[in-house]
Every structure is written in C-alpha cells, then in structure tokens.
Image: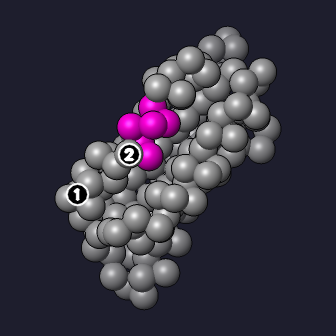
Amino acid sequence: MSDMDRRAFVGYAALSGVTAVVLTSSSAEAAGDNSGYFVIAEIVAPKEKAADLRDLLVPYAHKSAKEPGCQKYVLMEVIDEPGRFMTWERWTNKAALDAHMGTPDIKEILPKLKPILAKPVSQIFLDGRTGV
C-alpha cells in the first residue's frame, strides 16, 4: 500500500471511529434523546505549525462551547499526528449552528487559520437517529 493510500485509509478509519464513538457517547449523555444537529470537523496543519493551530483552536473551542444552542463542543488532537484536530459538536438545531457560524469569533479565527492549514477544513453534518 502506498503512503498516500495508507494515509487516506487511516484518515477515513479515524473519522469513522470518531463518528461512531461520538454518536454513542452523545446518546448516552442525552439519556436516549438523539435530537440535535451534530458536526464533526477535521482541521489539519503541518507538524511545524501544530502549536500555532493549537493556540488558535483551544480558546476558540472554549468560547464556542458556551454559545447559545451549543450542547457539546469537544476539540481533540490525534495523538500520533500533531497538528491534526477533530471537533465533535452538538447543537440544538441547524439554526444554532448557523448563528455560531456568524459570530465575531469565527469571523476573527478564519483568516488566521488559512495560512497555517495543510488542507481545507472538512465537516460532516449529522442528525441523530438512534442511541443505546
């Protein structure tokens, strides 16, 4: 398997695993309530920019978690890949996420992210269906 194939496979496997864990934990937290609007995002910087990205994302995640409509906002960094971050977010609905996307905090961080990212931010949007 080539290095690129391996990286793509590992990336897909990691994202799939995070999705499964997040949906399982979110349903347990909500005691069977799977309502909400879920987002999983991947934000990646080259290793040499990992600290710069971390310095931007950690305070941003703390602020985002306190916004109206945010039920959960978790920022994670892949252990073996410094500079590769994932978020798991649970919003009351799409309108709450849309409001978040229009905050001054997001308008401030986006231009700072562009020069340090290795690739564009990717996001997956989900609706909860079941939980155990």
Q: Quadrant of the C terminus?
A: bottom left
Task: Residue 94: give its label.
Answer: 1
- Residue 22 drawn above or below residue 87: below
**Front residue of this view, candidates 99 and 3:** 99
Q: Quadrant of the N terminus?
A: top right
Circle 2 crowding by C-alpha within 10 Å: few under 14, some 14–19, many from 20? few
Residue 4 placement: quadrant? top right
Residue position for label 2 = 104
Main SS, magenta region, reads helix
* Residue at figure coordinates x 33%, y 69% from the top left: 69
SS category of the residue bearing label 1:
helix
Give the residue type that dot 2 points to: Pro
Q: Which residues are magenta?
A: 105-110
The answer to which of marks 2 and 1 sits earlier in the sequence is 1
Determine whether, in the image, residue 116 is placed left or right of residue 106. Answer: right
- Residue 67 drawn above or below residue 59: below
* Residue at figure coordinates x 45%, y 31% from the top left: 110
Give the residue type that dot 1 points to: Lys
